[in-house]
Image (tube, rainbow, N blue to C red):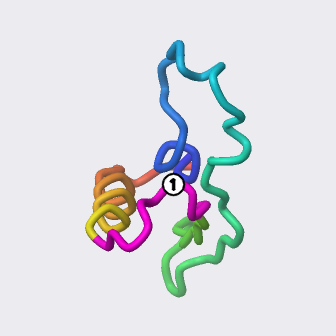
Amino acid sequence: AVAAESSTGTWTTVWTDGLTSLDRYKGRCYHIEPVAGEESQFIAYVAYPLDLFEEGSVTNMFTSIVGNVFGFKALRA
């Protein structure tokens, strides 16, 4: 859910969903590991396609990743 929400996902169906292949642009969680000493807490590693970011724009990349991911509350699995 974190990978999708921070790249192409939304909790609401929108008309633009059918315009392109979301599989090409979605973020992917490629590794999950437990947090040492913390029961039921994990670190998720997410990779994003480069097509999501404007070339040479550190600001675009920073706000896209940090703005979305740091805005999440802790998830209970």
The x, y position of residue 51, in whole percent, is 57, 57
Name the quadrant of the N terminus: top right
Residue furthest front as drawn? 55
Residue type for callout 1: Leu
Q: Residue at x 73, y 42 (%)?
A: 23
Q: Residue at x 71, y 68 (%)?
A: 30
Q: Callout 1: helix, strand or loop? A: helix
In depth, the one of 55 and 77 nearer the eye is 55
Q: Residue at x 38, y 73 (%)?
A: 56
Residue under numbered circle 1: 52
Is residue 39 shown in magenta?
Answer: no
Query: Which image quadrant for residue 29?
Result: bottom right
The x, y position of residue 28, in whole percent, is 66, 58
In the displayed structure image, the side of residue 67 where residue 19 appears, left or right: right
Q: Residue at x 35, y 52 (%)?
A: 68
The magenta region covers: 48-58
Is residue 19 positioned above or below 51 on the image?
Answer: above
The x, y position of residue 69, in whole percent, is 38, 57
In depth, the one of 42 and 24 nearer the eye is 24
Circle count:
1
Q: Crowding at label 1, few (<14), some or many (≥20) Cα neighbours within 10 Å? A: some
Query: Which image quadrant for residue 66?
Result: bottom left
Is residue 28 positioned above or below 16 on the image?
Answer: below
Is residue 49 shown in magenta?
Answer: yes
